[in-house]
Image: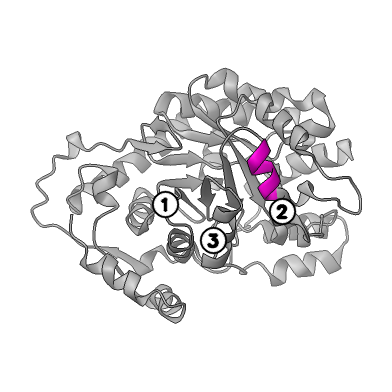
Amino acid sequence: MSDEVKQRKIEHVNVALNNDVTAAQPASWADVRLIHRALPEVDLDEIDTAVDFLGHRLQHPIFVSSLTGGHPDVAIINERLATVAQQYGLAMGVGSQRAALVNPALAATYSIVREKAPTAFIIANAGAPQLIEQKRHAAFTAADVRRAVDMVRADALALHLNYLQEAAQPEGDRRAKGCLAAFAQVAAEVGVPVIAKETGAGISFEQARDFQRAGASAIDVGGAGGSSMAAMESVRAQGRGDTHTAGIGLLFRDWGIPTPIAVVEATQGAPGLPIISTGGVRSGLDAARALALGATLVGMGFPFLKAASEGMDALHEFLARFIAELKVAMQLTGAATISDLQRAPVVTGGATRDWLDMRGFGDTLRGMARRQM
């Protein structure tokens, strides 16, 4: 099991970097329009992108989404990402720590993050399916999950809700009954805030409500429209000659709730909880749209992975461009701060509006379109 998990970690990185694993459906950010202010009365150089998240002040509303760890060859990626998280004042998550929980020799591939980012907001990672007994392994206990938190001296813990990925994974864990109760137990016992984090299929109103009741401190919607974990696992399954599982991955490549919709559903289902908008965010304009819809942070996975694989210069160039794009969007909506942007009027159209209308969020949409700063 230890070698299997370790090998899977390096395969995930290689597949993501060398194959097209984007979701078949777009994230639909173009359906979200911000209202232009011809005279914004905001100086671009004075825009403040700082934001509060779970009791910490971040310099920018950006989350380096939980990516990797668990194999010596990917430690350099975590090292580079942690370095920029520290320099830019970002939140950062590590990849699933299952590999190090079953093989402590791999812990350094994760703990390097805290070494390079001593004051950044670091988020540990455990998979929700592994909180219950599976056919091939026993359940992780709250004590096991606490070891993951201690490994990176984390400020919070993300419990990954990756059942779509598990269904498309040759060695996936398919049991789900009792997982919500296990989630609640960990949230009550682990000692740090717990984030419910989807990994590409989105969070609905009903599930957001469930997670809030189960003790989640924040929700990462992980919506459809970015990288597809089903597509990634399909590639891995094909490489093993497992055409049955590969076919499932291909069929469900476009499964899920697009990210902008998931942001609205989650904010309505779990009022008061911070929402992280991950899934298909590719520009500062996308980020501005997500924040205006109600998100507290925007998360990105593949853009950070790609830049980190190229080196520190690429990471700095990507972040500088992204932040500049966000600030331009803020100025053009008259928003001097992130809280201003979160009150900016928003108009939705296309399939996004149709979905939200059908789900009974028409009054919410009209309120977004009318609200004033």
Measured Cα–Cα span from mark 2 to mark 1:
22 Å
Helix or strand or loop: what does disc 3 sit on? helix
* Disc 1 secondary structure class: loop
Q: Quadrant of residue 177?
A: bottom right
Q: Amino acid at mark 3?
A: Arg
Q: Secondary structure at mark 2?
A: helix
Mark 2 = which residue?
181
Q: Which residues are magenta?
A: 183-189
Residue 95 visible in the snapshot: no
Question: Which badge, 3 or 2, comes first in the chain's sequence?
Answer: 2
Q: In the rendered image, which residue does mark 1 sit on?
A: 272
Graded by Cα atoms within 10 Å as few (under 14), some (14 to 19) or many (20 or more), the crowding at tag 2 reads few
Q: Nearer the viewer, residue 310 or 278?
A: 278
Across and down, in percent, residue 96 comes to 70, 40
Q: Residue drawn at (25%, 68%), measured in percent from left and top?
A: 369
- Picture quarter with the C terminus: bottom left
Quadrant location, the N terminus: top right
- Position of 110 with respect to 350 (left or right) is right
Dot 1: few (<14), some (14–19), or many (≥20) neighbours within 10 Å?
Answer: few
Amino acid at dot 2? Ala
Q: At x 79% / y 32%, what residue is drawn?
A: 101
Quarter of the figure with residue 78: top right
Amino acid carrying label 1: it is Gly
Q: Which residue is mark 3?
A: 209
- Left or right: residue 86 versus residue 30 is right
What secondary structure prevails in the magenta region?
helix
- In the rendered structure, the answer to whether residue 69 lies left or right of residue 370 reads right
